[in-house]
Amino acid sequence: MEINTFEEAISFAKQKEDAAIHFYESAGQVAKNPGSKVMFQEMAAEERKHFKMLDALKQGDIESFPIENVPDLKISQYTEDVPFGPDLDYQQILIVAMKKEEEAHRLYSDLANMTSDPGLAKLFRVLAQEEAKHKHKLESEYDDHILTSW
């Protein structure tokens, strides 16, 4: 995959955000627990905010975004892949979501490392950071509601 311009990067990221919106909307429909439905609706809303932010982002704006260290609980690395489907329970939906966020984080991190353009690298690092924040939120939810119930 080759992304050479800011515009190509934004277009690519918007496609990824759109897919994430659809995933979280679907997860919210599949979830049986009302609290789970709310969490997935909130995640879909987060992705919509990212889409709108990307839509309005200008090339020079990216320099003002801070890069933070987002904690990684590494829970998704120790869970087995689960195919998404209508019969998943809450734990399985969280696993699918954590793995999707982990994959998106890795993709943007790899893209940041592959480009020689400092502006694109910063954009990809910011996008990776946002995915890391989502992963952390999901892993915290998993830790609080799944691991503590064992």
Image (cartoon, helix red, strand yellow):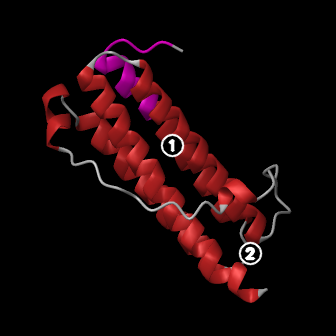
Q: Nearer the viewer, residue 18 or 91?
A: 91
Q: Name the spot of residue 53 as percent of width and height, x first.
A: 28, 43
Mark 1 lies on a secondary structure that is helix
Q: Is residue 49 left or right of residue 66?
A: right
Q: In which quadrant is the C terminus drawn? A: bottom right
How far from the left and from the top, in percent, is residue 13?
43, 32
> Height in image: 4 above or below 120?
above
Image location of residue 102, percent across then percent down: 58, 48
If you read the primary sequence from the N terminus, does the residue marked by circle 2 or circle 1 appear first? 2
Q: CA distance from mark 2 to mark 1?
A: 28 Å
Q: Quadrant of residue 57?
A: top left
Q: Nearer the viewer, mark 2 or mark 1?
A: 1
Q: Residue at x 47, y 49 (%)?
A: 131
Prevailing secondary structure of the magenta residues: helix
> What residue is pinned by disc 2?
32
Residue underneath mark 1? 105
**Residue nearer the viewer, 42 or 91:** 91
Q: Nearer the viewer, residue 110 or 127?
A: 110
Q: Is 89 left, or right, of 129 in this rendering? A: right
Residue at x 61% of width, y 82% of height: 144
In this image, 4 relative to 21: left or right? left
Q: Which residues are magenta?
A: 2-14
Residue 19 shows in the view: yes
**Residue 8 x %, y %:** 38, 18
* 9 up-or-down from 80: above or below: above
Q: Is residue 22 visible?
A: no
Q: Secondary structure at mark 2?
A: loop
Q: Quadrant of residue 126?
A: top left
Point 18% across, 30% down: residue: 58
Instruction: Reply above or below: 44 against 1.
Output: below
Q: Residue at x 14, y 42 (%)?
A: 64
Look at label 1 and name its amino acid: His
